[in-house]
Image: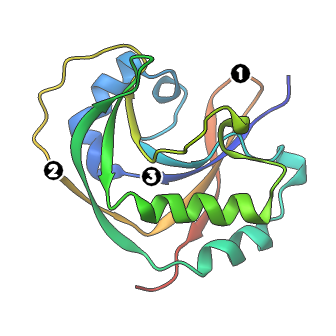
Amino acid sequence: MTRRTALIVPVPEAEAAVGAIRLAHDWSAARGVPAHITILFPFLPPEELDEAALHDVFARFAAFDFALDRVEQFEDGLVWLHPDPSWRFADLTAAVWQRWPDHPPYEGSVDEVIPHLTVGETPVDLDLALPIAARAHEVVLIEEEEAGGNWATRLRLPLGDS
């Protein structure tokens, strides 16, 4: 099994509200992945990464404010928080996918990429104080330390000045 990488926007502002819930209901939280909105997963194998190209892609985008404004649930039961505006995250995903067209989001398994912050893989009952105000100022490249293992930050990719 090959080690995987992902591009995420960390949302530390959400940790107090959903950190414990994620730890209990989201496999990635237990493996060191912070509350986040995924930009692209899975991404390139670690040995194929071009860090300079990644910096170039994200430097074109300005940092931005957003709010986690409501709880949603996918048909499969996954509970998530909706970021507003979500189109900003979709634009980041589109830029990466355009640069690396052989690596579509979620391996091409979804027809539409919906930006979201995963809370739990099983239905969870949430009573959150929403909205949660946040700021996207960087994309973080994370990678598995070993196949199927914990995840760690490999590279921080700042968004341009707002």
Viewer-nearest of discs 1 and 2: 2
Viewer-nearest of discs 3 and 2: 2
Residue 39 is situated, as x and y percent measured from the top left of the image, at: 57, 52
- Residue 49 appears left or right of 123: right
- Residue 58 appears left or right of 137: right
**Secondary structure under badge 2?**
loop
**Secondary structure under badge 1?**
loop
Residue 65 is situated, as x and y percent measured from the top left of the image, at: 30, 69
Residue visible at 52% across and 75% down in the picture: 159
Front in this rendered view, residue 146 or 106? 106
Q: Which residue is mark 2?
A: 131
The outermost residue toward the top is: 122
Along the polypeptide, which appears first: circle 1 or circle 2?
Answer: 2
Residue 75 is situated, as x and y percent measured from the top left of the image, at: 41, 20
Q: In the rendered view, tell whether residue 59 sits above or below residue 151.
A: below
Residue visible at 58% across and 56% down in the picture: 140
- Residue 83 appears left or right of 151: left
Q: Which residue is mark 3?
A: 10
The outermost residue toward the front is: 111
Instruction: Give the residue type that dot 2 points to.
Output: Pro
Q: CA distance from mark 1 to mark 2?
A: 34 Å
Based on the displayed image, in which of its 4 quarters is residue 41 positioned?
Answer: top right
Q: Judge the density around disc 1: few (<14), some (14-19), many (≥20) Cα neighbours within 10 Å.
A: few
Residue visible at 54% across and 45% down in the picture: 113
Q: Are marks 1 and 2 in contact (CB under 8 Å)?
A: no
Q: In the rendered view, tell whether residue 53 sits above or below residue 108.
A: below
Residue 77 is situated, as x and y percent measured from the top left of the image, at: 39, 17
- Residue 155 appears left or right of 161: right
Q: Residue 100: which disc?
A: none
Front in this rendered view, residue 76 or 31? 76
